[in-house]
Image (tube, helix red, strand yellow):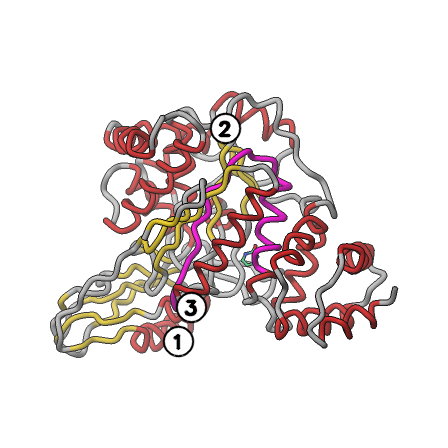
Amino acid sequence: MTMYDIIYKKREGGELTKEEIDFFIEGYTRGDIPDYQASAFLMAVYFRGLTKKETFMLTDAMRYSGDNIDLSSISGIKVDKHSTGGVGDKTTLIVGPLAASCGVPIAKMSGRGLGFTGGTIDKLESISGYRTSVESQEFIDTVNSVGISVIGQTAHIAPADKKLYALRDVTATVDNMGLISGSIMSKKLASGSDAIVLDVKCGSGAFMKDFDSALKLADYMVEIGHSAGKKTAAFITDMAQPLGSAVGNALEVKEAINVLKGEGPEDITELSLQLSAYMVFLGEKAKTYEEAYQMVETNLKNLKGLEKFSQFVKAHGGNENIIYDFNLFPTAKIKVNVLANQEGYVETIHADDIGRAALALGAGRHKKEDKIDLSAGILLQKKMGDKVTVGDVIAEIHGNEDEKVKEAKAIIEKAYKVSKNKQIKQKLIKALIAYKNEKIY
Ligand code: URA
């Protein structure tokens, strides 16, 4: 078997065997297959696609390319949550503590942001002292004592995906159904939780731009989870506009804390309640989803979720006083308002453009090695459907360099589209593939 034959077969639209997929993944992880052949293979997959069977085999090969975490010393059903990535998505910081406050053990490994989408680990690093890298025993001990730990993914989890994702990112082969499903699910399965709640984003700020492709991606991932013996469910949620108001690391952590105080924006509060309720349901702390929803809603109101947030920040060496003193977060030197220049209703806020504006401010990275500005970002003051008059503040820019702020301002001005007509608010939660696989729209 040669890599040439495998590339050729896929280029011609053939279905690969387990031996061929294993040959590629093992060879590429070891460094025996060069990037130029892996790139050609990825592009062939991009155009020809992967069948469901191939996607399952790819996921398995990547999952077993490294360590599989053993969480058996944590009692109870461990539940993980994963978002396919979006702009302003800070739900992990809310749903983790909320579900943990209802007794669900959360042992979560998260990623960093790349491109215009953010990552939980960067956000957590805006809390002074928070250690995102800990030994596996400390990770397990923290879940056992506090109920939740969130750390960065180690290099030993699905190393094949780590290498391949970096290559996909520079060869325009990220947004492919089979490759995304395999990439996400290989890491989720290797991370050892018993159940997984997926948040598949759909819209301009997501990899999946339309509902049908998001639904297909969700279907693939739920089936992969089930076939690996994990209870898996997927929400399909809107990413036509950023989630909540804050985009940028410290700003997003502050907003997550506000949600846990019951003072956050409505959209992210509702999505967080639904996601965490499903985690509580899959974690068997409630008999029905409705009962689980009541539990998380109660723990939002009585601040048990906030208390859990503070406990897990402290357990990771972070300053837990940040929940009451936002001055402890890194703060940007420059604040500039973006004003409406037209009267009407906000028709669109292109989430990807807002992500790019945050990137221009230094809140994200173009390359893995880039250092990010944790204080930089954007606060959206107007969301889709809101009424605006000329001169209203539509967004607030937080930055540290005049040139970058200027660039971000120009991008944000273009990202907003105001129309004369009253807008019908889009549904935030578009569908749920429940874990027994019935679809609810
Ligand atoms: N997130 C991942 O981890 N992998 C992908 O392929 C896309 C989003």
Looking at the rendered image, the disc whose residue lies closer to the viewer, 3 or 1, is 3
Identify the element where label 2 is drawn.
helix
Distance CA(mark 3)–CA(mark 1) = 25 Å
Residue type, mark 2 in image: Ala
What label does residue 438 carry, if any? none
Residue type, mark 3 in image: Lys
In the image, 161 versus 179, the foreground residue is 179
Looking at the rendered image, the disc whose residue lies closer to the viewer, 3 or 2, is 3
Distance CA(mark 3)–CA(mark 2) = 38 Å
Query: Counting residues from the N terminus, which is met first, the one under dot 1 or under dot 2?
Result: 2
Identify the element where label 3 is drawn.
loop
- Cβ atoms at labels 1 and 2 below 8 Å apart: no
Identify the element where label 1 is drawn.
helix
- Magenta-colored span: 180-204
Query: Counting residues from the N terminus, which is met first, the one under dot 3 or under dot 2?
Result: 3
Within 10 angstroms of label 2, few (less than 14), some, or many (20 or more) residues? many
Distance CA(mark 1)–CA(mark 2) = 39 Å
239 within the magenta span:
no
Q: Quadrant of residue 358?
A: bottom left
Check mark 3 vs ligand 1: CB closer than 8 Å? yes or no. Answer: no
196 within the magenta span:
yes
Answer with left or right where residue 272 lies relative to residue 266. right
The residue drawn where x is 50% and y is 58% is 217
Can you identify the residue that label 1 sits on? 407
Q: Quadrant of residue 48?
A: bottom right
Residue type, mark 1 in image: Glu
Image coordinates of residue 417 in percent, x first then y, are 25, 76
Can you identify the residue that label 3 sits on? 209
What label does residue 315 carry, if any? 2
